[in-house]
Amino acid sequence: MRVDKLSHQLDSEGTEFVMDHLDGKSFSPFFLGLPLLFASILFLGMNQLTSRSQEHPTDREHGGMSMVMDEPMSPAARAKLLADKRESEFNHHLAGFFVLLAGIFIFFEERLKNRWPGVRYAWPLCFLLSGVFVLIFSDTELWPFGPKSWWSGVAGNLEVLQHKTFAAILLALGVIEMRRASGVLRAVWSAWIFPVLAFAGSVLLLFHVHSAGMHGPDAMSKMERIQMQHFSYAAAGVGIALSKGLSDAPFQGRRIFRVLWPLCMLALGILLMLYVE
């Protein structure tokens, strides 16, 4: 079956059409890329968790940095390190839950919109909730949870600044898509805000700083593991940006990408929920 025929039927039957065409004869080779991309992103995340966790850098590679990080810690410092680890993992897991939930709503929106017209607001709301959470709870050393002011925290710590930038991107995406869903914002350019901001956030992930808790004999392997996980998030984010942009582009095959981009969202949500330090 040709892609143009698939695209026509997909628009009328939604995601149910995709499931009905996994039977061999009518299965287009193009659809093979959907599960392969989804599986490859998940494999990347799981592979880097297992393969990197056992790696230990040598003193020759890291010099004095390794010696400083290997210094013994007091019980209070160990307790603080554990608390920071749990907080960071929880933040990633909850953000991943919101992304996963948004992907589910997007994927089944065509099937649910007749029974529940308000479903079109569900996934933008997930971005808004995630943005509010990251903005307020991502750095508890800031007021009102900690002694630091927001100005000193954001201006003096690159990691905090990046967290707040991610929060701003999530909030902007939620607001824009909420207005588009309500019909208030109908300009053609508004459809490209999501892919542009998603791509910018993905690039920023490649330079994400994570300095908290970098102590102990496995500090360097932990840093490498965290970096690789964020690389997998960036890869999924680029997939989301490209497929979302193409799903709104004026060409006949765009309906295929309306299935692909929520799958990438699901993959990113799962990867975030698997985050470990």
Image: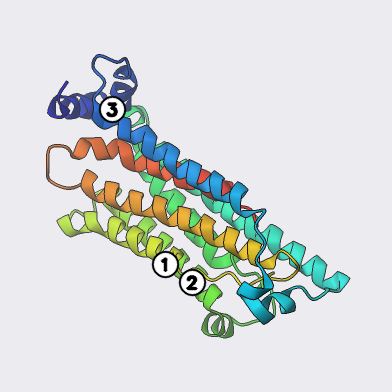
Asked if marks 2 and 1 touch (Cβ < 8 Å), the reply is yes
Left-right relation of 24 to 162 = left
Q: Secondary structure at mark 1?
A: helix
Pinpoint residue 91: horizontal percent, then vertical percent.
Answer: 60, 57
| Snapshot colouring | rainbow
> Mark 1 is on which residue type?
Leu
Asked if marks 3 and 2 touch (Cβ < 8 Å), the reply is no
User: Quick one: quadrant of the C terminus?
Assistant: bottom right
For mark 1, does the 10 Å Cα neighbourhood hold few (<14), some (14 to 19), or many (20 or more) residues?
some
> Mark 2 is on which residue type?
Gln
User: Quick one: quadrant of the N terminus?
Assistant: top left
Give how far apart the Cα atoms at labels 2 and 1 are. Answer: 8 Å
> In this picture, is 218 found above or below 112?
below
Residue 97 seen: no
Give how far apart the Cα atoms at labels 3 and 2 are. Answer: 37 Å
Q: Identify which residue is drawn at 56% across, 85% down.
A: 156
Q: Identify which residue is drawn at 52% across, 43% down.
A: 270
Left-right relation of 257 to 216 = left
